[in-house]
Amino acid sequence: MCFKESNTLLRILVLMCFSLTITISSGANTISANQSLLGNQTIISERGEFELGFFKAGKSSNYYIGIWYRKVDSNPPTIVWVANRETPISNIFQSELKIINGNLVLLNESKFQIWSTKITTTTLNSAIAVILDDGNLVLRDGSSNSIEPFWQSFEHPTHTWLPGAKLAYDNRTKKSQLLTSWRSNEDPAVGLFSLELDPSTTEYICKWNGSQQYWTSGPWNENWGRFDKVPEMRFIMDISGHAQQQTWLEATKEWNLFWTQPRTQCEVYAWCGAFGICRQTELPFCNCLTGFKPRSETEWNQSDFSGGCVRKTELQCGRNMEKPDFLMISVKSLPQNKFMAVGSARDCHTTCLNNCSCNAYSFVDNKCSVWDGDLLNLSEDNDNGKQVYVKVAYKDLPHHNKSNRVTMGAVVGSIGVAVFVLGLFLLLVYRKKRISVGKTRMEGSLVAFAYRDLKIATKNFSDKLGGGGFGSVFKGVLHDSSIVAVKKLESISQGEKQFRSEVSTIGTIQHVNLVRLRGFCAQGNNKLLVYDYMANSSLDTHLFHGKQVLNWETRYQIALGIARGLVYLHEKCRDCIIHCDIKPENILLDAEFCPKIADFGLAKLVGRDFSRVLTTIRGTRGYLAPEWLSGVAVTAKADVYSYGMMLFELVNGKRNAEQSEDSRSPFFPCLVSNVLKVGGDILSLVDSRLNREASVEEVSKICKVACWCIQDEEDSRPSMSLVEQILEGVMDVNMPPIPRSVTLFVDNTQRVVFFTESPSKGSSEVYNSCSPQSESSSS
């Protein structure tokens, strides 16, 4: 009896010893060969950037091993990598992640191996798994000083592309590394959409179902190398089928969309599934065709449209088949998987009608196309679309029998003239009194507001925030209590349809340094734009009106942010967008003083009147490039000039042409040029309210950049991408020549005087040639 008890005690002690060896200490970043990770245990990267452990996907009861941001305080956590995305587990206290035979493996509740790194290594007993501060999980030899991994998660991405990770073509395996979307928010298994590298063209492409390409990045842009220098930046393949670049905003505790492609939801291939049609002007975007219903109502209600639609009434082949008819739809492009038939439009119709397997036909450009499989990628286009005729059960279409049509025709015929005359009379009476019709609704990613609703939101446009050449801006509060800025545009001659088209294009442009357009109103002569409200107003209120003195660090980051926004407009959009009115009034600041360029794209909306608007508005002339006045075509370098003039004001805290009490202040760009030339006191140029608390190197850099930006010749000015690289410290900047325009001034008698420097003149004489400009000559 004593012997049995002693054996039992021995077993307990042995088990206790083993339990101690698998414990992972709090804050550890490593799993060693004698350790396991289970339950709520995690490992954390050295600086606490990333965490690895078990997590739940949405409301699902399934668990997965994954990596997430630890310092980003989002709920649920932002997952960046998943190990067992196809094989979930249900009990994290009986499952474990451990190293076996040199491989990192995941064992489920039954101790079956459901995931492994699957490598061959000779360091079976010394392998360790480490989570790094860039989010990379590496498996390496723990017995040597070598940090070269045998395996790393960066070479096996799931749905997120982190800075430093690889998304390339593996010549050894002849396969591309993919980003693949989750199946749904509650299921991280491989979804329908992927992002991969095409080795033949070195372009990144989006695919549906691993086969159908629906977007390409074009040639690789070397400027994208900066992604690994931007903190809390991620590149993901979203479940919506969009490749997205997102950045974390600590102020709002949420991920902010920095860049996304394709631009509209309906450009994502087969987003609405079989026999579903995508309408960019409605929410939800997906609807089943008339005569069809969702294959799964549950999935459809959860905005998962991938299952598509099925006919409400199945068509049976044969003599007693349900009588079919055709539903005409107008789509942007014809679906794939068609085959061609010969004959006229009538022959095409008859061929499909008499073929039991035919689901649709189309007769476009005198060619008959017939489909016998599912119709995918249907995107509605009622203006310039191609007609497709889809076979549907006759009873499921909105037909009316002949007797109804005869009766209705008689009624309509008897009262038609009266209705027409009455309608014409009412139209004439109320033509000039019409203020608002329609309802606020979604148009793609934007809200199409009713004028009446915006009038209520702004309290009849009573709380004015500011104004400019394009119109006045008012503060408004929407029904959901969100605060917005409503710009009431003036002198807009465009028709409503053209205005909607242009605004829809602008609405797809999103960048962290551009003000987000939330919606618009286009009713009659009323043209309004609705933007996010910026808590810290515009830059000019801080520089010139004493709202709050910005420290130098904030000013430098504002300069860099504006540069990044202009790079996006000039180089990253499908078509180059020239802002044409860069000035402090058009730079808005959010709660964290992150700069947001406003009014981008309005030059295109205003059209022919744009030049007149700019040249008649006080304060804008000081930012106009010389080419505006010469009549030549304006390029993106006009924005570079305006940006440079604004940089001077960011340094000085005053308008460039602002006069002192004695009216003898020098023109500030001229003063900067001469201080740079003679190597003078650079901090003397900084806003006096900062008490010289600024970086000499940064002030010098910004002043040099500003002087380069305002060169008289466009070709001498840098691109905004070069400016961005200089401010980021990637590129150096040389000493700029003094632009001729900064030695120009107009005295009180309006005499125009040009100053040229001869070798005999000293720097002090050149300095004295800088005099204040009047507003009319600041360009």
Image: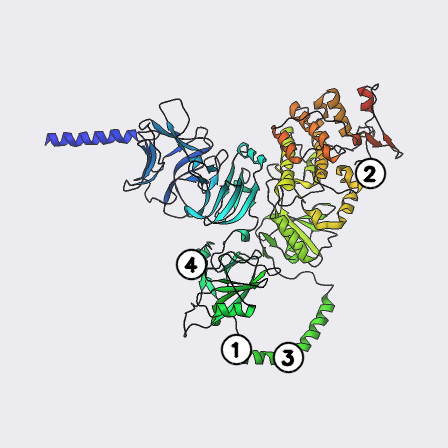
In this picture, residue 223 sits left or right of residue 671: left
The x and y percentages for residue 11 are 19, 31
The numbered mark, 3 or 1, whose residue comes first in the sequence reads 1
**Residue at (46% x, 54% y) in the render:** 306
Q: Which residue is mark 4?
A: 296
Q: Answer yes or no: is residue 574 visible.
A: yes
Q: Quadrant of the N terminus?
A: top left
- Report helix, strand or loop for mark 3: helix
Instruction: Locate residue 302 relative to residue 452 in the image: left or right.
Output: left
Q: Which residue is mark 3?
A: 413
Lower position in the chain sequence, tag 2 or tag 1 = 1
Helix, strand or loop under label 1: loop
Between the C-alphas of marks 4 and 1, the distance is 32 Å
Rendered location of residue 641, percent (x, y):
72, 36
State the residue position of label 2.
776
Residue 627, quarter of picture: top right
Say which label, 3 or 4, has the lower sequence index. 4
- Residue 141 tag number: none
Q: Amino acid at mark 3?
A: Gly
Question: Mark number for residue 401?
Answer: 1
Q: Where is residue 309 shown, x and y percent of the image?
A: 46, 60
Q: Nearer the viewer, mark 4 or mark 2?
A: 4
Residue 330 occupies which quadrant of the picture?
Answer: bottom right
Side of 430 where 413 appears, left or right: left
The mark that comes first in sequence, 4 or 2, is 4
* Res 156 → quadrant: top left
- Amino acid on which the number 2 mark rests in the picture: Ser
User: Label 4 neighbourhood size at 10 Å, few (<14), some (14-19), many (20+)?
Assistant: some
